[in-house]
Amino acid sequence: MYLLRLINRHLERTRMPETLFGRTVVNDPRFVSDLRNGREPGPRVTAKVCTYIADAQERGR
């Protein structure tokens, strides 16, 4: 899944815990874990995650 690879790269680059990422971006600390277990996010959640990561990259994080 493209989104999970994108998130994993972001987590590695920033050393952010997956629970903090989920809580910060979608208010769900189990979000990344659920993705790994087959959760399929909708288009709005996917867009929110992509926007968050793109903004973080622009800020140099």
Image (cartoon, rainbow, N blue to C red):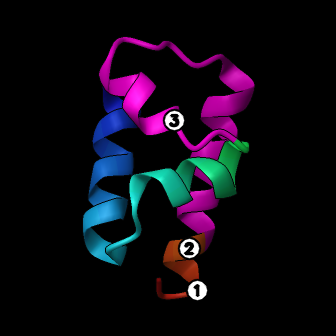
| Label 3 packing within 10 angstroms: few (<14), some (14-19), many (20+) | some
Magenta-drawn segment: 28-55
The residue located at (65%, 16%) in the rendering is 42
The residue located at (43%, 24%) in the rendering is 34
- What residue would you read off at disc 3? 30
Whether pointer 1 and pointer 2 mark residues with C-beta atoms closer than 8 Å, the reply is: yes
Q: Write down the quadrant of residue 12 in the picture.
A: bottom left
Q: Is residue 24 above or below residue 5?
A: below
Considering only order in the chain, which callout, 3 or 2, is on the residue closer to the N terminus? 3
Q: Secondary structure at mark 1?
A: loop
Q: Is residue 6 magenta?
A: no
Q: Is residue 9 above or below residue 44?
A: below
The residue located at (56%, 80%) in the rendering is 58
Q: Of circles 3 and 1, which is in front?
A: 3
In the drawing, what numbered circle is on residue 59?
Answer: 1
Q: Position of residue 25 (x, y in %)?
A: 67, 51
Q: Secondary structure at mark 2?
A: helix
Q: Secondary structure at mark 3?
A: loop
Residue at far bottom of view: 60
Q: Is residue 23 above or below residue 16?
A: above
Whether pointer 2 and pointer 3 mark residues with C-beta atoms closer than 8 Å, the reply is: no
Q: Position of residue 35 (x, y in %)?
A: 41, 25
- What residue would you read off at disc 2? 56
